[in-house]
Image (cartoon, helix red, strand yellow):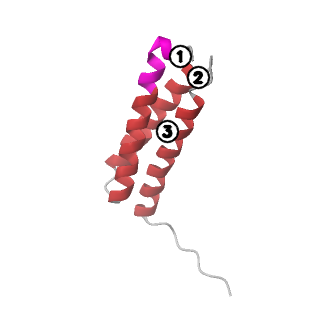
Amino acid sequence: MRDPWWPETPVETSARFAWFALLLAVVGFILSWIPLIGIFIGHVFGIVTILCGIIALLRATTPPIARLVAMVSILLGIVTMILKAIPIINLL
């Protein structure tokens, strides 16, 4: 016999969105160190990460741990964008 299908709760969806923002932040930070196209990648992933993190924070059903994850992803997105805005670091 098969288990019945249960739809996801809004809490699970909000938490998943915060973890997705953290995944984007880490991937964007790592890919931004590619020498020439890393500047573009860093800025694009930084903006998308910040937006996803803000959306995850603004949802009312986001659990506290997911809110912390969203804040960390926003911080990592900002760090990525700042590092890619400094010309000397972009040469590395």
**Within-10-Å neighbours for mark 1: few <14, some 14–19, many 20+:** some
Q: Which residues are magenta?
A: 81-90
User: Marks 2/1: CA distance?
Assistant: 8 Å
Task: Give the foreground label among 1 and 3.
Answer: 1
Quadrant in the picture for the C terminus: top right
Residue carrying label 3: 25
Q: Amino acid at mark 1?
A: Asn
The secondary structure making up most of the magenta span is helix
Residue placed furthest toward the bottom: 1
Of callouts 2 and 1, the N-terminal one: 2
- Image quadrant of residue 76? top left
Tell me which residue sits at (48%, 45%) in the image: 22
Residue carrying label 1: 90
- Image quadrant of residue 79? top left
Residue carrying label 2: 38
User: Would you say the residues marked 2 and 1 are in contact, meaning their CB atoms lie under 8 Å apart?
Assistant: yes
**x and y percentages locating residue 66 in the rendered image:** 39, 55
Q: Amino acid at mark 2?
A: Gly
As displayed, is residue 13 above or below residue 29? below
Q: Answer left or right for 27 relative to 48.
A: right
**Within-10-Å neighbours for mark 2: few <14, some 14–19, many 20+:** some
User: Marks 2/3: CA distance?
Assistant: 14 Å
